[in-house]
Amino acid sequence: MTDEQTVEGGLAEPEELEPEQGSLRLAAPEDRRDRAQGRAEWEAAAAAVLRRARRLGDDEPDALVWEKLTLTTLDGIGVSPLGTPELLDDLTTSGRPSRAGAWDVRAHLLVTDARADNETLLADLEGGATSLWLRVPEDTDFAVLLDRVLLDLAPVVLETTEAGARAFLRHAEGRDLEPRTNLGLDAAAAGPEPAELARRAGIRAYVVDAAALHDRGASDVQELAHSLAVGAAYLRRLSEAEVGVDEAARLVEFRYAATAEQLPTIAKLRAARRLWARVLELSDAQDRAQHQHAVTSRAMLSKYDPWVNMLRTTVAAFAAGVGGADAVTVLPFDTPLGTPDAFGRRIARNTSHLLIEESHVAVVSDPAGGAYAVEKLTEDLAVAAWELFGRLEEGADLEEEIAGTVARRDRDVATRRRPITGLSEFPNLAEELPVRPPAPEDEVRRYGAAFESLRDDPAEEPVLLAPLGTVAQHTARATFATNLLAAGGIGVVEAAGSDRAPRPPRVACIVGTDAAYDEEGAARAAALREAGAEWVVVAGRPREWADDSCALGVDALDFLRRTREKLR
């Protein structure tokens, strides 16, 4: 309380009652545990769960749960299942968000028709968007496109050529522009003239678009290292043109992808600020802030069961906000289907507003600050990205690095270690997709592209599901096989009481327990072949009497392609 706020009278602060720092205990005596005891109890409880799931052997020590439950990112960084103080030994917290209050709710629009798109962006602004990100051709009629847009209140971030940026400035001549307005030019090709034009207008000029690299399959570390490499080259180019480093840093904004992997996204944005601050420190800059724009990942979206995209973008927007992004763009859930409609755009805007106004995520400036797991992951990402940045400066090939990441991710998606709900897991072959007008294709490599290609061309013939035993005995594997086949665009029909249907499908899948397989699997397979089946699959581990098998951990894409080949 300041002197001005002090109320005369009242009682003095009872300082003698204030407990010594670190001595206050909020837990009741019976609830207190020393750290070693608590750790042992947690290990025992976690080990019991893993043993029931047959992920930990009876003779294996409880302490192995740390290894079993540690998530390893595509960059090879381990994410601990439980944050503990020991994770922060010898670490210094850095990269904390500088944003105070709500983030900028930035709507994205691919401009194709200036007049029609003007109505769309006005609806966005009236519906709660606080800024616009416009991908525009250089010959856009800005007078039509931005009619009734208050440029002094709503920042406009362009994605265009230098000619397009100059056309925008001509349109805005004589007006005050919101300082966060950005000409959106590629920082990799920065030059002094656009920088001077932006400086005179009091706006920004350049964007380091690391999200574009993410769209092509890059990992978090690669995205960070690429942004540093482009940012450092940008500073050099403008310094050679006698633009001061502080001015150059003010003129640029960084764009990162936010995914549904919550903790890595939070840590990535924190690490990005820390890394850029280090670059600016080495460049003798006075202000070391980074202007961040987070956009929900295009690559994580799915064309099938697109409603799940709402969940993905909500988690991503939450992570971006908690990570401290200054501006957040939530892409509409129907983006993979074509041009998003008004409903998709409204849901995208409202996602941020629900997080800000209803969940109050932006009230605390750094919600993840001090969280052991987040701080450790921030450190690991920053160290790995700085190392890769150094190699890029020495001429390392980033494309080769990205290709390795893509291969690892594709393998995880194919084996469903990275499940995609509604596509590789729990697909619905009977769904009717919303129809959207076609949109120009971006260079985006969606995680589920291989499964989507199978769904785009569904199999004309179903697989016969042949159960053994009671419903209770075969339901688990029948459900597993049905979902797996549906992920590849293959339907199923269940066998009736007899194997001798008039024209059975050419592929049959036997489902049941291991005991039932031992007892009657061979006979059932022979009966199916006699009835006309040309290829017999078993749900579970391979059997001599089956031509193929499907189980947890198999390469689902390979299995589905083999099965579809037999159905041709």
Image: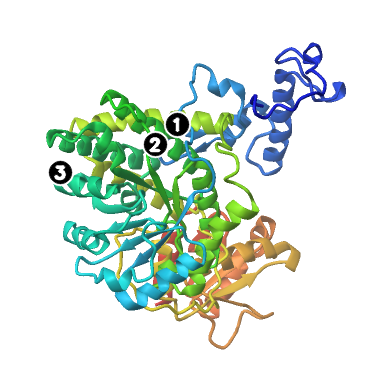
Disc with the residue nearer the chain's start (1 vs 3): 1
Secondary element type, mark 2? helix
Secondary element type, mark 3? helix
Disc with the residue nearer the chain's start (3 vs 2): 3
Image quarter where the N terminus lies is top right
Residue ID for mark 1: 95
Residue at 60 percent across and 43 percent down: it is 363
Which marked residue is nearer to the observer: mark 1 or mark 3?
Answer: 3
Image quadrant where residue 449 sits:
bottom left
Q: Where is residue 306 in the image (x, y as percent from the top left)?
A: 50, 68
Residue ID for mark 3: 192
Secondary element type, mark 1? loop
Q: How far, Cα to Cα, is label 1 from label 2? A: 7 Å
Q: Do the residues labelled 1 and 2 touch (CB within 8 Å)?
A: yes
Front-lying residue, 526 or 313: 313
- Dot 2 alpha-carbon crowd within 10 angstroms: few under 14, some 14 to 19, many 20 or more: many
Amino acid at the residue labelled 3: Pro
Query: Of the numbered discs in the image, which one, if any, rests on residue 272?
Result: 2
